[in-house]
Image: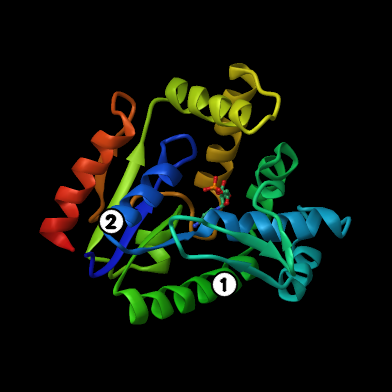
Amino acid sequence: ALRGVVALDGPSGTGKTTVARKLAQRLSAGYLDTGAMYRVITLAVLRAGVDPADAAAVTAVAKDTEFSVGTDPERPSVALGAEDVSAAIRGNDINHAVSPVSAVPAVRELLVARQRRIIDEVLAVVGGIVVEGRDIGTVVAPDAPLKVFLTASPEVRAARRSAQDTAAGRESSQADARASVDRRDRLDSSRAASPLRPAEDAVHLDTSELEIDQVIVALRELADHRG
Ligand code: C5P
């Protein structure tokens, strides 16, 4: 079983979520989807009728929002209050608004503190956790023994995102998916507060040509050596 934190960062459409969950299952570890936390705050912002670009108003919503995220890789759950919002946080409205919300420094402070608490709790109970996001290796868990930065070509990422949308019953063309993925990566990489970037000691893995199971094999090997 895994000891400590595996930090899994990278842009969208790299297979991060699928890989993180499977890896956690195989390593009998916990799992934390930090993107889901930014998404649930974004859902609360939109429901409150607040402009995602209004940092002060967004911060106020974030402070007031009661939410929870599960850490079992078999059934990840996200709740806003008592409502299961696992599907609602994947909508296009959320994809569009999440980057401005997650660029607000006070929102990040709040969520990073919460993420560290969750990580500590899981480590105390199961001993290992796979954490996925954009700033896990750089900010949330800079001491993680294994940091991985997943990449994939823009074409592959757009195709994966579009397939995910279609599988979830949302309308999606590859061109739309490409535009949406590109826009989010540009915003996430260029923001001032903890932009998307690899940690200096991260292992880079290009998943364009790999099946999920091949990625898992590569990561398990790394985890055996470093974890
Ligand atoms: O990983 P996912 O696509 O669900 O993340 C949604 C958004 O949340 C990202 O595009 C990014 O704006 C934000 N995010 C972040 N830091 C993280 C995880 C996600 O800023 N650690």
Give the quarter of the image for residue 175: top right
- Which residue is painted at 71% across and 55% down in the image? 42
Amino acid on which disc 2 is placed: Lys
Classify 10 Å Cα crowding around label 1: few (below 14), some (14-19), many (20 and above). Answer: few
What secondary structure is marked by label 1?
helix
Residue at the spot of label 2: 147
Return the x and y of residue 47 as percentages of the image width and height: 84, 56
Give the quarter of the image for residue 101: bottom right
Q: Nearer the viewer, mark 2 or mark 1?
A: 2
Which one is in front, 11 or 15?
15
- Which residue is painted at 41% across and 66% down in the image? 139
Amino acid on which disc 1 is placed: Glu
Return the x and y of residue 19 as percentages of the image width and height: 37, 44
Residue at the spot of label 1: 109
Name the quarter where the N terminus is drawn: bottom left
Q: In this view, does 208 lie above or below 194?
A: above
What secondary structure is marked by label 2?
strand
CB at mark 1 closer than 8 A to ligand 1?
no
Q: Earlier in the sequence, mark 2 or mark 1?
A: 1
Q: Is residue 78 above or below residue 17?
A: below
Q: Is residue 104 above or below residue 23?
A: below
Determine which of the numbered discs, if any, sits on residue 63 in the image: none
Which one is in front, 167 or 188?
167
